[in-house]
Image (tube, rainbow, N blue to C red):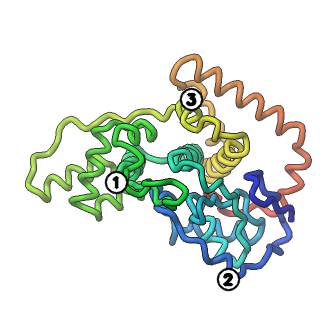
Amino acid sequence: MEVVEDTGKWLGVDTSGRQPKLTDADKEPEYHELSTVFVSFEDTQEFDGLVGSIKQYGLFEPILMWQGWIVDGRHRHKACLKAGVKPEYEHLPDDMPFNVVLDRVVAANLMRRHLTTGQRAMTAAALATMTSGARTDLEPSANLREVKSIKQSADQLSVSERTVDTAKAIKRDAPDLAEEVSKGNMTLNAADNERRKRKGLPEKTNAPKPKAVDLDELMRIGGSNWDSNVAAGALVSTARDLHLQEGDKGMARSIMHILENGDGKHSQSYNAAGLIALYNAIGEHMSEIQSLLVVKPDTSKMN
């Protein structure tokens, strides 16, 4: 198995099922709050599929570390522990500002996850109250300030400030409903109506309208911290999820819907050019890619 240490490059895939074994040292890293703001899928069939995928094929995407914390990849890390497979890490510089780390993690998760408006609002609410948790010897006074305002968090997650305020109110007044929204089992509006009913408040009649996620904005937020490896990893994970959930025809419909309903001609052209480049690049290596398909997995989610 090809192993890439601390470079952020794509990991090689080992189809032998003989992965490097887990050691006690691999269990030591702790999870930064940032790694927990996106909805968890632990204790689900999706997580079991991830464990099985790692057992058989190894880890597709390294776990992201900063200042000794896991900032992205807690499910990949837990799945490695459960599978008994040695995790692989990418280490960001300790002196990298936390806002830069946060932007990278958020941009990557938005690309590889399919989040509802309510889930994005809950994530934005969590980001709006987060402190960096940084080591103060490397980032002075970082723990004493919140790193994102409500407006910044709302803009980054492509929701309105009003929607974030609603999410914060649900988190405060009805944590059980907030959890259902975070899991995608309940809309934000339905949860807020139930919250208001519990508190004896009148039902709102003008629910906030969702905003569309803007790919160009994600790329802008990522800035120089965005690279082709992050984009490739997010794209492969998304394509795999769509194939497993929708099948070949459903995936094609989803792709065409994205292309045809972009926000203006620039986005449509930008997405089409990217798809053509991807098609040409993969076409040159189709036989090599097909050789990796030893066994078609039943399920695999967000590895």
User: Height in image: 150 above or below 131?
Assistant: above
> Exactly how many numbered labels are in the figure?
3
Q: Which mark is nearer the camera, 2 or 3? A: 2
**Element at label 2:** helix
Name the amino acid, label 1. Met
How much space separates mark 2 and mark 1, taking CA atoms?
39 Å
Q: Is residue 276 left or right of residue 162?
A: right
Name the amino acid, label 2. Asp
Mark positioned earlier in the residue sequence (2 or 3): 2
Cβ atoms under marks 2 and 1 closer than 8 Å: no
How much space separates mark 1 and mark 3, taking CA atoms?
29 Å
Within 10 Å of disc 2 (Cα), the crowding (few <14, some 14-19, many 20+) is: few
Q: Mark 1 points at which residue?
A: 186
Q: Name the residue under label 3.
A: 216
Mark positioned earlier in the residue sequence (1 or 3): 1
Residue lying at 21% horizontally and 59% vertically, measured from the top left: 173
Return the x and y of residue 229 as percentages of the image width and height: 73, 45
Examine the rendering and report whether any part of residue 76 can be seen.
Answer: yes
Mark positioned earlier in the residue sequence (2 or 1): 2
Q: Which mark is nearer the camera, 2 or 1? A: 2
Name the amino acid, label 3. Asp
Task: Name the mark on residue 24.
Answer: 2
How much space separates mark 2 and mark 3, taking CA atoms?
42 Å
Residue lying at 78% horizontally and 60% vertically, measured from the top left: 5
**Element at label 3:** helix
Return the x and y of residue 153 as percentages of the image width and height: 40, 42
Examine the rendering and report whether any part of residue 114 can be seen.
Answer: no
